Amino acid sequence: MKAATTSDQQKVIDVHAHTHSAAAEAIVESEDGHAADRIRARRHIGEASARQNDNLMKGVWRHALVDPNARLEAMDEFGIAHQLVSVSPLQYYYWADPDLARRVVAVQNESIARLCDLGKGRISGLGAVALQHPELAVSQLVEGVRDYGLKGVIASTSICGRWLDQTVSEDFWECAERVGAVVFIHPPGFGWDDLLSDYYLSNLVGNPLETTIVLLRMIFGGVFDRHSALKLFAAHGGGFFPHYIGRFDHGFRNRPEVMTCKHLPSHYLNRIWYDCIVHDAQTLDNLIRRVGATRVVVGTDYPFDMGIQNPQELLDRLDLTAEEKSAVCGGNAVQLLSLGGMPQFASWSTDNQ
């Protein structure tokens, strides 16, 4: 895979990358809930995949997650001008009680803010929130944006056995709208008991499937109808949602129990942002044509192996106009993250492409 040239650099904003808070892990490591969560996770993803992930975490992943210099070097290698970081799904800790959740989230968000400070102006952050405690989650959202300068929050598709839309309160969505916070929906990587425990299907199929389900639940549940200014960003290209939209529209037209939102599901396609982590040029091209070039942003899933190391290489295989490529590479992220005040993002030239 070819790394970006110098002329290509300073053009891409990566909005899907992860970090790890060792301080938060130290707080929870002796908790029964943490031990139970790890056992459940290993059962759901299968022992073979759990061993592989353990080896990678002990090796390349842990260092890449926590070392700001290694992160900046990787960004330089592949022409990433700016990166949005969030905790990995391994650190959701939704099992924690209110007191523990308050402590853990504070430490996580402090860790992310510290990484941003060390990022030489090239790193922004999304905060963690204790979505299992709705009132606490609202206050943590406000504190993350106000006190730590974070751009929003990362949220799982499911929380303690309930879907995101069943757990999050109207106050949370309203607060996210009011403060202009991005809500990044990222599945936890497990949640199907042992149905998908072979062949890493918990990730290969489970991740995009969970995102698809949550987006549809939010649409049919009227979340987008009630919160028109919500800035929702879906990982992994929005899962299967954009690609099966015809089936979802058909169901809306023909099934009375589905006719619960104001419009066809396809009406909400361009109310959501999607990253480019679909691993295939044809699929990415279809995503862009479905949702519009103004709704797709670059993501790498750094540093994990199910991500895209060099997103420019994938984008270069598409038949995009200069304007479309400029939008996907960074212009859309400028809008999503309100980065317009940063001089390096004032315009997005494609002269050297």
Image (cartoon, grey):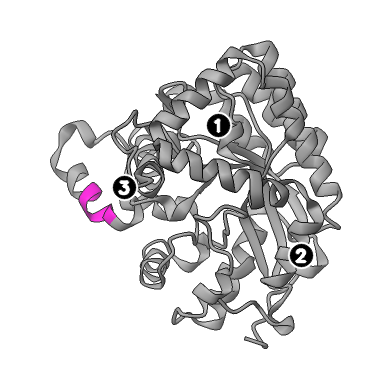
Give the percent coordinates (x, y) of residue 160: 46, 21
Q: Earlier in the sequence, mark 1 or mark 2?
A: 2
Q: Earlier in the sequence, mark 3 or mark 1?
A: 1
Q: Amino acid at mark 2?
A: Glu
Mark 1: give few (<14), some (14-19) or many (20+) Cα within 10 Å: many
**Label 3, on which residue?**
265
Q: Residue at x 56, y 23 (%)?
A: 94
Q: Amino acid at mark 1?
A: Trp
Q: Quadrant of the N terminus?
A: bottom right
Residue 73 numbered mark, or none: 2
SS under mark 1: helix
Say if residue 184 shows up in the picture: no
**Label 1, on which residue?**
173
Magenta stretch encompasses residue 247: yes
Q: Amino acid at mark 3?
A: Pro
**Which range is magenta?**
244-249
Query: Can you tell which quarter of the image residue 95 is in?
Result: top right
Mark 2: give few (<14), some (14-19) or many (20+) Cα within 10 Å: few
Q: Main secondary structure of the magenta part?
A: helix
Q: Residue at x 34, y 47 (%)?
A: 199
CA distance for labels 2 and 3: 41 Å
SS under mark 2: helix
Q: Nearer the viewer, residue 295 or 227?
A: 295
Q: Earlier in the sequence, mark 2 or mark 3?
A: 2
Q: Residue at x 72, y 74 (%)?
A: 347
SS under mark 3: helix
- Discs 1, 2 touching: Cβ within 8 Å: no
Q: Residue pushed farthest left?
A: 254
Say if residue 183 shows up in the picture: yes
Residue 290 falls left or right of residue 79: left
Give the percent coordinates (x, y) of residue 49: 44, 43
